Amino acid sequence: MKSLSAQRAESSDEQQPPVRAEWLTTLLSTASVLLLLIAIADPARAAVRGSGDLALVIERATGSVQIVETTGNTMLARVEGLGDLSHASAVYSRDQRYAFVFGRDGGLSKVDMLEGTLAARVVQSGNSIGGAISQDGRLVAVSNYEPGGVKVFKADDLSLVADIPAEQANGQRSKVIGLVDAPGRRFVFSLWDAGEIWMADFSAGDQPTLQKFKDIGRNPYDALISPDGRYYIAGLFGEDGLALLDLWHPEKGVRRILPDYGKGEAKLPVYKMPHLEGWAVAGDRAFVPAVGRHEVLVIDMNSWQEVGRVAVHGQPVFVMGRPDGRQIWVNFAVPDNDTIQVIDAETLALVETLKPGKGVLHMEFEPRGEEVWVSVRDADRLQVYDTATFAVRAELPANKPSGIFMSARAARIGL
């Protein structure tokens, strides 16, 4: 005969499994509710995701940016409070998690692409126009109109590392434009007022060594660096031609190329200066927007000679190459900014004309080029096109969208 204590122990053991099951059910139910509340409160945090298919869209009228994903072509989050974005651009940290947005009001904003939040922001000048991130991803540089010069910040906390005033011979400061990153932890930029190109070399530490190239031409207005990081090219507003600096051999100085590039003899009206960083490179040829002309120029990058011209719908602003180099997409200045045309890079034939709507400001290809995103400012929308069929794959609402920046730019020089 079992003792009373043994009978009580057996009774307790028999009742334990239901109690544990009830406790586990309650716990799982509570966790599900918490996950649901997190998803409702912040959809951007509801799913774990990588950063490779993300993009940032500038909403210029509202000081905000959209974060979108390109696998399903949907919006994930909107981040506000970025100031004046009327001429904004962005670069990415090397892990693609953070976008650094350069505002016209001198604001430098660090956006967390995965959290959908504004991680940090500093107002570093009175008027700025673009920036770049160093080869190692540790430094972010901003080019400034007012006061003229370049400021360089640590990427992790936006603390100031270096201040480079763009002082001319007369002691006055020059506006700085065309700032790009170059291999060797260098930044290269142009001085509008001084007609110079400067190179700031940070390879030895956080205080740069400056190299200055003078008398490159009047009023450099924009610049680009070739995809391999070798050539820095500045456009000249004050005269025809381009200024080229070979970064493999900077000791050779700046030389002039394409002496007829510019307004030319007719001095046609320029409604918007073309963006040189919007050059398309396909093989050993570059496709270049003509200034004040309804043409795209074709340049041999070995000889830097013009080898062809393509007549197009209007005055080109961006001339963008599909990642495989087969297609060249072109948008236009007013009054033709409702149109996009597509050029076959092999035959130089126009193969498609699209009419997305008024105010087509920017185009950006997905990393492998199967789709292209287009901002249509006046229609307050983004349109996504299939680059093989030219069919519209998606439309998304946006507040006066302008620049579109894919996170894949993190792995590309000069972008």
Image (tube, helix red, strand yellow):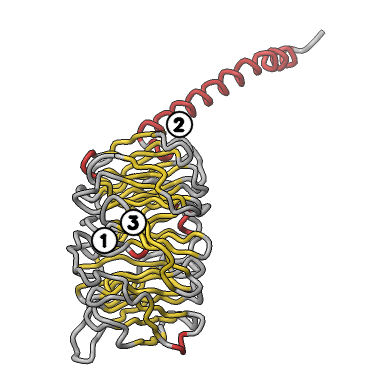
- The residue labelled by disc 3 is 318
Q: Is residue 327 above or below residue 198?
A: above
Dot 3, crowdedness within 10 Å: few (<14), some or many (≥20)?
Answer: many
Label 3 to label 1, Cα distance in Å?
Answer: 13 Å
Q: Amino acid at mark 2?
A: Leu
Q: Amino acid at mark 3?
A: Phe
Q: Is residue 171 above or below residue 259?
A: below
Label 2 to label 3, Cα distance in Å?
Answer: 44 Å
Quadrant in the rendering for residue 399: top left
Q: Pointer 3 and pointer 1: residues touching (CB < 8 Å)? A: no
- The residue labelled by disc 1 is 293
The image's mark for residue 35 is 2
Q: Earlier in the sequence, mark 2 or mark 3?
A: 2
Give x and y (percent) for residue 51: 49, 48
Give x and y (percent) for residue 215: 30, 87
In which quadrant of the rendered image does the N terminus lie?
Answer: top right
Nearest-to-viewer mark from 2 and 3: 3
Q: Residue at x 41, y 69 (%)?
A: 306
Q: Is residue 346 above or below residue 156?
A: above
Nearest-to-viewer mark from 1 and 2: 1
Q: Amino acid at mark 1?
A: Arg
Q: Pointer 2 and pointer 3: residues touching (CB < 8 Å)? A: no
Dot 1, crowdedness within 10 Å: few (<14), some or many (≥20)?
Answer: many
Position of 14 with respect to 58 (left or right) is right
Residue closest to the far top: 1
Nearest-to-viewer mark from 3 and 1: 1
Q: Earlier in the sequence, mark 1 or mark 2?
A: 2
